[in-house]
Amino acid sequence: MCGITGIAGFEDPELLRRMTASLRHRGPDEEGFYETAKVSFGHRRLSIIDLEHGQQPMSSNDRKAWVCFNGQIYNHSELRKGLSDHYDFQTTCDTEILPALYQDQGIGMVTKLRGMFAFALWDESEETLYLVRDRIGIKPLYYAPLGNRLLFASEPKALLEHPEVSREIDPSALQTYLKLLYVPPPLSIFRGVRQLPPGHFLKWKDGELSVQRYWEVPTELAQARTEDEWAEEIEPVLRDAIRMRLMSDVPLGAFLSGGIDSSTIVSIMAEGASERVKTFCVGFGEEGKAYEERPIARRVSEYFNTDHHEIEIQLDVVQAMEGMVRGFDEPFGNPTAMLSSELSRFTRQHVTVALAGDGGDELFGGYPRYQGMILSEWIRKIPKPIRGMIAAFAGEKESSTARNYRRWLRQLLEGSDKEPAQRYSDWVGYRSDQEIASLLQPDWAHDVEMAGYSDPVADLFSKPSEASSLQRAIYADLRGFLPENVLRYTDRMSMAHSLEVRVPFTDHLLVEKMMAVPDSQKVTRMASKRLLRKIMKDRLPEEVVERKKLGFNPPMGIWLQSDRLGLIEEWLNPSLIESRGIFNAKEVERLVGEHRSKTRDWGLQIWSLIVFEQWMRSYLD
């Protein structure tokens, strides 16, 4: 796992070194450069495979193809066998497969890769640069066009080393942040920086660039099969996805929450293991007991006899928020990122690589909103006045607990009359377009309107137009919520502590298989993750298989109700908000008042504004 940087077009060599130095946390072990008059690469290495010979940037045998790589190619040994009769491999490192495979097949070789990756490849003969990002979006890649020049890097902070890269706020990015609590590609919060979307590659030649998709999430269902037949087909693919991610020349472990996703990973890791699997879990004190998962994680650890490690979160929230913002370089409103950072910091004291269950909910159907998509069709049959009365009752007192049933019920009822795309967008988002307009000052509301904002979740939901509502919801999450929320905080917060996290449920072959499974094998009105529970029924403790989803979240709503940390007074006081000229101070006061009185749970919405203020202090002031 590494950090990569580069410049296409002549620039000051010292700039490349500053860019690369800014990513030292992603690769503390080694630094390397490749520099020509046309293209220059910088690399920071976290050594995982072939510790002695995996230095980068790396070239082909004839030094005509150069690669700067971040990630892991899990099928590199298999690919190597097909090339070894006409290519002289110098290392056992997975990086070397990239220039070798490119020379054999051209850029189409990306479809052969199984893993997580973001890399730059320079074809010296064709004087062409390619930037490539993995199918699901596990590894990040940002770029900044500057006339006929191009800068790229694993994180925006490296691009901001160039004084010509604009730090102005992109209005469309602001709108999407307020709605989703993250900024999806191709946008970034900075007007001068763009993200390469997952499953795409960028081609740059003679100052001209183009972006092309090379993989799409499939949505076509397979022919009818029984539940047993589906379990028989999916299980070996799932097992293979986990086992191939165990390759490592350094210590390896797993995050363990006690949920079915992480427990599935640990169960397969434990099969035939020569040593006890190292597992890691976080917990909370009395204040966050509703979010506590340590007891069930201990049960799983005992069941598989793992070498289990726990940490109780005691956050200095202000310090953690500052570190989180610096880790993302952008405002990121999901406070789970702070937990991920603490878990990664703790885990890195014991291992260099950890497996995580990210993607299991999207793939197997674990989110309550998936059941909501099915239930909403039934709820529409209830007379509208009755639905309105129930929604009003549910919304009277919304707690900030881990499982907020009142809020779920209110959202379910309020969305039942809307078109499916808008309904799903509202469930994934945290503010409606009308609420955002009320929150913004008139000038910024005008700028957002002029930018031609388009709802990213509704757009994604609408793409597979012939699919079922559930299939479209999962598609939208695989293209949006998973890579840009869950995988983003996993990557940034783990790499901030030089920990590599691998996510087996994002294996593209497993994704393709699961997208062909019919809705009824994933989710019904009363059950979620049906197929995974079927597969793991005899392999996990019953209480784990039957356990309802809790989620990996801090008690942020509870913290903000008392504001014992002084976050609201310091970061959201009316005079400060007015001086910034972006948000409406009266609207912010209304949200805070309703949250403190426990009328509505606005915890995440308030937190996202606090984070945005911290981001402005760090990057704009």
Image: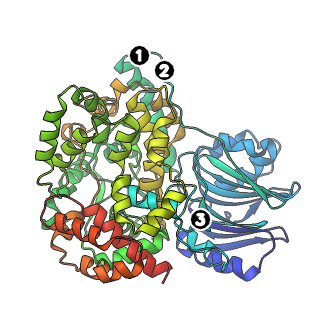
- Mark 1, mark 2: which one is toward the viewer? 2
Asked if disc 3 and disc 2 are in contact, CB closer than 8 Å, the reply is no
- Mark 3, mark 1: which one is toward the viewer? 3
Of mark 3 and mark 2, the one earlier in the sequence is: 3
Location of mark 2 (residue): 222
Q: Is residue 621 above or below residue 303?
A: below
Residue 427 position within the rendered picture, expressed as x and y whole percent measured from the top left: 32, 45
Asked if disc 1 and disc 2 are in contact, CB closer than 8 Å, the reply is yes
Which one is nearer the viewer's eye here, 372 or 577?
Answer: 577
CA–CA distance in space, label 1 to label 2: 8 Å
Which quarter of the picture shows residue 83? top right
Q: How is the image coloured?
A: rainbow
Say what amino acid the circle numbered 1 marks: Arg
Q: In this view, does 146 lie to the left or right of 287?
A: right
Q: Residue at x 64, y 46 (%)?
A: 76
Say what amino acid the circle numbered 3 marks: Ser
Which one is nearer the viewer's eye here, 234 or 188?
Answer: 188
Q: Is residue 579 above or below residue 538?
A: below
Res 154 label = 3
Q: Is residue 172 left or right of residue 528?
A: right
Give SS at disc 3.
Answer: loop
Residue 481 position within the rendered picture, expressed as x and y whole percent measured from the top left: 43, 49
Which one is nearer the viewer's eye here, 366 or 393?
Answer: 393
Q: Is residue 71 above or below residue 606?
A: above
Res 482 label = none
| Res. 343 visible in picture | no
| Res. 571 visible in picture | yes
